[in-house]
Amino acid sequence: MTNLRLAKYVVSAVTIWVATSTLAQEATAINDATMANESMGENWLAFGRTYSEQRFSPLEQINKANVASLQPDWYIDLPNSRSLVSTPLVVDGVLYFIGGMNVVRAIDASSGEELWRYDPQVAEHASRRMRVGWDNSRGIGLWEDKVFVATWDGRLIGVDRHTGEEIWSAQTIDPELAMYITGAPKVFKGKVLIGNGGTEHGPNRGYVTAYDANTGEQAWRFYIVPGNPDDGFENDAMAMAAETWTGEWWLHGGGGNAWHGFTYDAELDQLYIGTGNGSPWNRQIRSPGGGDNLFLCSIVALDPDTGDYLWHYQTTPGDTWDYNSNMDIVLADLPIDGESVPALMHAPKNGFFYVIDRRDGSLISAQPYVPTTWASTIDLTTGRPIENPGVRYETAPARIAPSSIGGHSWHAMSYNPQTGLVYIPSIFLATGFSNGNIDIENYRNEQWRFDMAVGSGPGGGPTREFPGALQAWDPVRQERVWEVPADGVWNAGTLTTASNLVFQGRADGHLIAYAAESGEQLWDYDLGLGISAPPITYSIDGKQYLAILVGWGGSMAALGGGGMAQYGWAYGAQTRRLVSFSLNGESTLPPQAPPTIPQPLLSSDFIVDPQLAQSAAETFATACMWCHGGGAVSAGMAPDLRASAIPLSAAAFEQVVRGGALQNNGMPPFSDYSDEQLESLRHYIRAAAERTASTQ
Ligand code: CA
């Protein structure tokens, strides 16, 4: 043992001795028993707090009578972060969270003091992979003495949760494939599970992999869609799934990527995977003779020890609208026909709220929780949707609701067993679909290229008088109990507590508390920056805290455009933060910069060539847009290029775009771009700047 390692050993031995001798409290073991324990309110051990994913806390010190007096207790500024969308975890007074560039911090949860920081050096590892996925992570996992980090570039890493030292690292993605990770690792029974995204970034085939929590060795892998039959199927489930595909689907990858929505059921010892949509979106291309295309858009139950298939329920057979089922899967025993049924609840993108018997995957009930036009109802006998005519846009364009963002995205819903209600951040939008000018028979996507193989169609926009709402949904009666309209669509996940409170952060920067039974607003705190992460609650020495990451982000914030840019959360303008509130908090948050709308930079030296500008439209839409925003209108995840001086200089533009000069800020190198591509992009950006200036 080296001196350094010996010193560390002595320090940690002393730490443990101090901890056990001066504090009467025993350290919490992080295992199957504690992660299933609903009554242990002081900790928040897993993504959805406990294995049930209910995000229901038994704490009730903060209640309806006093919630209005919540004040910041401590905060930390995170100036180098962008998107903050993750759920922090808490064990024995230590808060762990993942921020920008996948940096993980351990924080004293009573003071905000940083204990350690682990930086997985994402920019260095990801390089061109930063072209896909952007700087989002929805969380981390805990098990025994480790915290698990899944990185943008596809690594799964086990870190010592007492010291922040890396213990093992496994690469979960083929470096040649345009896949990435934004999801939280799911930990159960000494294993760590991770999936990936990438359905829209190339002909990719989704899968999930489980690793040994101690060693990082692969335990099993489950593919979500079948591969080329000539290569043989991995298992009977893939042979069964292949019966539901037509044509040469494997040339398109198939998709189904599981990037979110993993639930472990400790009671039945089953693992549930929410699966993604098809690659590409358009079923006419990937499966031209039709078919359900298993296991796209499904909940698949697996044996947690082996990864063997147990059962599945497909929410959107033969999906062609991006109606993936990656949304959270929440477990509860529900009173159904006078019997307590072990159920799971799921509100996927397709707009129906599903209650499923988790013993065998049979459908109990399904009703639309947002306006739906693609299907009128779900047949309870067959479990299948009754589709409306023309919705597959095979012969004519169609307006479809919900939109491809979904009636509900990854923003967590919560379930309160006392009120029996589910609190869902909901979206009321439609999308126009068509085959556009796509060559259906010969279409191929390639790696690192965003493309869905659908054209635009008639009339998107809101399907109700407001574009979104926080809804309280009764899963037994399958009906809305109350709702609070929102003026935006990208509002964050929810938390509910035993004092019958519901907390939600919104796109407009407000963190709000509601009465869980009625939706009455009880508290409103303006954090001055869009909120995209769900709040958590924990307690230390009998004092309850409410913590939340404040940092506008996620895919819609990256996609930009007018609706998302309206809030003024411009790149670099406001400060990202972690804030923890309490009833006797005495901390004052420094004021945020006011909402800021970037102004186009004008130069009489740059003469836009409209034809050259137009020729870059496709490059911009399949690459740049996904961080810098549609039409070069950024919503704050990356600089607004209309306001940037870099496109004015050919040399500077080349250094950044092709040379990777800003790689450490998250700008990936596009080393394969030609001089012509770079030049036309400059003209595209400058045309957008001049267009904006002319309308002001
Ligand atoms: Ca998708």
Image (tube, rainbow, N blue to C red):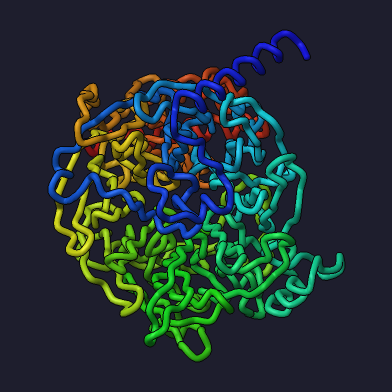
Residue 270, image quadrant: bottom right
Tag count in the figure? 0
Q: Can residue 673 be seen at all in this image of the molecule?
A: no
What quarter of the picture does the N terminus occupy?
top right
Q: Can residue 423 be seen at all in this image of the molecule?
A: yes
Look at the picture and state if 423 lies above or below 25: below
* 212 on left or right of 259: right
- Residue at x-position 23% and y-position 60%: 516
- Residue at x-position 61% and y-position 50%: 196
* 283 on left or right of 352: right
Q: Farthest top residue? A: 3
Look at the picture and state if 671 lies above or below 434: above
* 240 on left or right of 407: right
Q: Position of residue 16 (x, y in %)?
A: 56, 24
Residue 335, image quadrant: bottom left
Q: Position of residue 223 (x, y in %)?
A: 71, 61
Look at the picture and state if 503 lies above or below 233: above
Residue 144, image quadrant: top right
Look at the picture and state if 536 lies above or below 38: above
Q: Position of residue 348 (x, y in %)?
A: 45, 66
- Residue at x-position 24% and y-position 57%: 500
